[in-house]
Amino acid sequence: MKVSEVIIATESGLVTYRTGREEASPLMSLYPLGGRLFEVSNDYVYIKIILDNGTVFEYWFYKKFKTNFRSGGLFVDLFIDPIGDQLHQTAWITHDGNYTPCEHVKIGGSRSKKGVHPVSKEMADELLRAMLVFAGTSARKAAIIKESVALFGKSAYYKDDDLTPKNRKLFDFCLTRRIER
């Protein structure tokens, strides 16, 4: 899987990344809640991820959606920034979204489904890896992060936490073309 383009829009503007190396003013506004937890301050954050095979993932995160960006403790901070720049934040927040059952999931031309994960855990972890590479993380480091999440993130995907009841209502997801394997 390879990301070819990322579009981020908020009420304050829009930026398109085609190489992952473009400089852009941050659009995502965040409010720190403490304990490595942040809340989206924008009215909305729209993220569109386009893969090289034409698959399109679209996310709408709304005000008060909570994220910890990159999970893991202080030891992991030595290897990768827990927040990062706008593209890394996009990778982390979409991964958090993929791990949260959502009230509005639309796949292809199907009707919207309620209370389901946007994508499988395997797809969520692979998309995280691809987004990290697009954001400038080395392929090796992104693969290690993916394998760590695959190993240690199972409970986060399959079991709801205290944030899930509110977060599931604060984002929408649309997949406009399925991945062909």
Image: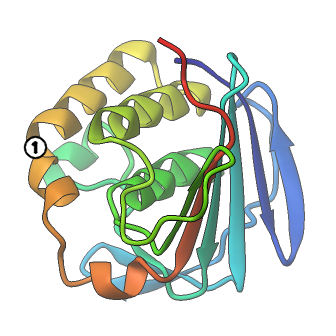
x then y, percent, for residue 59: 62, 59
Residue for badge 1: 152
x then y, percent, for residue 73: 16, 56
Q: Residue at x 50, y 26 (%)?
A: 130
Of residues 149 and 117, the one nearer the viewer is 117
* Mark 1 surroundings: few (<14), some (14-19) or many (≥20) residues within 10 A: few
Question: Considering only vertical position in the picture, is 115 above or below 162?
Answer: above
For this view, does 64 lie left or right of residue 177? left
Is residue 61 something one can see in this rendering?
yes
x then y, percent, for residue 86: 64, 53
Q: How is the image coloured?
A: rainbow
For this view, does 42 lie left or right of residue 36? right
For this view, does 25 lie left or right of residue 82? right
Q: Residue at x 66, y 29 (%)?
A: 55
* Secondary-structure class at tag 1: helix
For this view, does 153 lie left or right of residue 19? left
Of residues 59 and 7, the one nearer the viewer is 59
Quadrant of res 152: top left
Identified by mark 1, the residue type is Phe
Quadrant of res 40: bottom right
Is residue 73 something one can see in this rendering?
no
Question: Considering only vertical position in the picture, is 62 above or below 19?
Answer: below
